[in-house]
Amino acid sequence: MIRRIFRILSILLGFFLLLFAAAAVVVIHVNSPPGLAPRGSGDGSLRIEEDGSVTMDVRNGESALSVGKRLEEAGIIRSQYFWYLLSRFEKEFIKTGAYRLELPASQIAIHSLLVSGRQLLHRVTVPEGATLKKTARIFQDAGICGAEAFLEAARDQSLLDHYRIPGKTLEGYTFPDTYLFPLNYPPRLVVQAMVDNFYTRLGELDEANPELGILGLSPEELYRRVRLASIVEREYRVDGEAPLMAGVFFNRLRIGMALQSCATVEYVITEIQGKPHPEVIYTRDTEIRNPYNTYMNPGLPPGPICSPGLTALSAVFKPAASDYLYFRLVDPAAGEHYFSRTLDDHIKAGVFYIKGNSSGGSTLPL
């Protein structure tokens, strides 16, 4: 009797082992890459890249079954039904976004990637001297976030309070740099990443120049420096001249002389009046009545006119000591300026020039 029971149990055990082995073979088979060349989709949500990888967009609200069906149709996985079973056993949902699939890859590996939310990051470069509006358009063109949503985040009072910025927007604090973001990223997080980067770079300047106590400045004094740095950013063309320019502006502020920066006039024309970037600044332009026009108003403008880079920021914390009150572009090709102490010398230096737009436009005579 006992021998019969053991025989039955052995048969059952063998049967289950055989069943388990067969199931394992099936799972291994359906989980393995199909060995076919992947195909892109007509709607562009599955794209074959030049290096053989696949970029896949998971749509907002799309079901796991829909994702599996598209992957099977594209020849990336063997079975949409096995994909669905994976999704049923997984506690986490597939995340919306753009993903880079390195093929060949198993279904489990692809499913883990989409569940993890490790989206494809897109490289976006914001040039030095870019304004908030230009930055917003850069991110919109890259598909990171909408321009209006970016600008709304940059005006968010809670963010201004969090960073203790006394201005009405984050203009000047969105540090120009190269960033990596996924598509359709929350604009508030984009803005925060840029401002956090600003303070990180400021910390590096402070560490390199502890005697200046940069991070110890009050929010109001820092805002004053950022406003001046934004003007220096739009004026200098040769790195070594930036500290000299900062020194000139500090000298003018010290004696109550108007800054007379063409860059602020350009800001009024392009950012406030919404007109195209001027090739030439005329006398009538310097007479535009606006608080940002530093020809008409002494002192600093109400806010920064762009996002300054490290060169301009460093210049306003370490301005070159001199008794210069004027500078003028004398070599457009080299971007060199002539610095002078008197108006007579300034006039003799030649024609005025303005710095081209932040995207690298040409410099033309004033």
Image: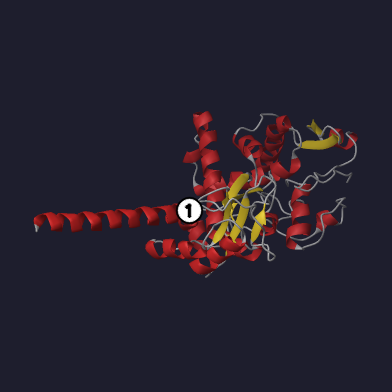
Question: In percent of the image, x 78 and y 37: which residue is there?
Answer: 326
Where in the figure is residue 269, as x and y percent of width and height? 79, 58
Question: In percent of the image, x 51 and y 64: which residue is there?
Answer: 80
Relative to residue 42, is residue 263 depicted above or below?
A: above
* Quadrant housing residue 145: bottom right
Question: Mark 1 falls on what kind of element?
Answer: helix
The residue sitting at the left extreme is 1
Left or right of 327, for residue 91: left
Relative to residue 94, is residue 33 depicted above or below?
A: above
Left or right of 281, for residue 69: left
Where in the figure is residue 50, as x and y percent of width and height? 70, 47
Count neighbours of disc 1 (C-alpha within 10 A) and say few if under 14, some if 14 to 19, many if 20 or more: some
Q: How many marks?
A: 1
Relative to residue 60, is residue 115 depicted above or below?
A: above
Question: In percent of the image, x 79 and y 44: which residue is there?
Answer: 360
Most foreground residue, 17 or 253: 17
Q: What amino acid is at disc 1?
A: His
The quarter of the image holding the N terminus is bottom left
Residue 137 visible to an observer of this rendering: yes
Residue 296 visible to an observer of this rendering: no
Left or right of 296, for residue 94: left
> What is the basis of the colouring in this image?
secondary structure
Most foreground residue, 47 or 25: 25
* Quadrant housing residue 312: top right
* Quadrant housing residue 154: bottom right
Q: Find disc 1 in the rendering and name its residue.
A: 29
Most foreground residue, 24 or 181: 24
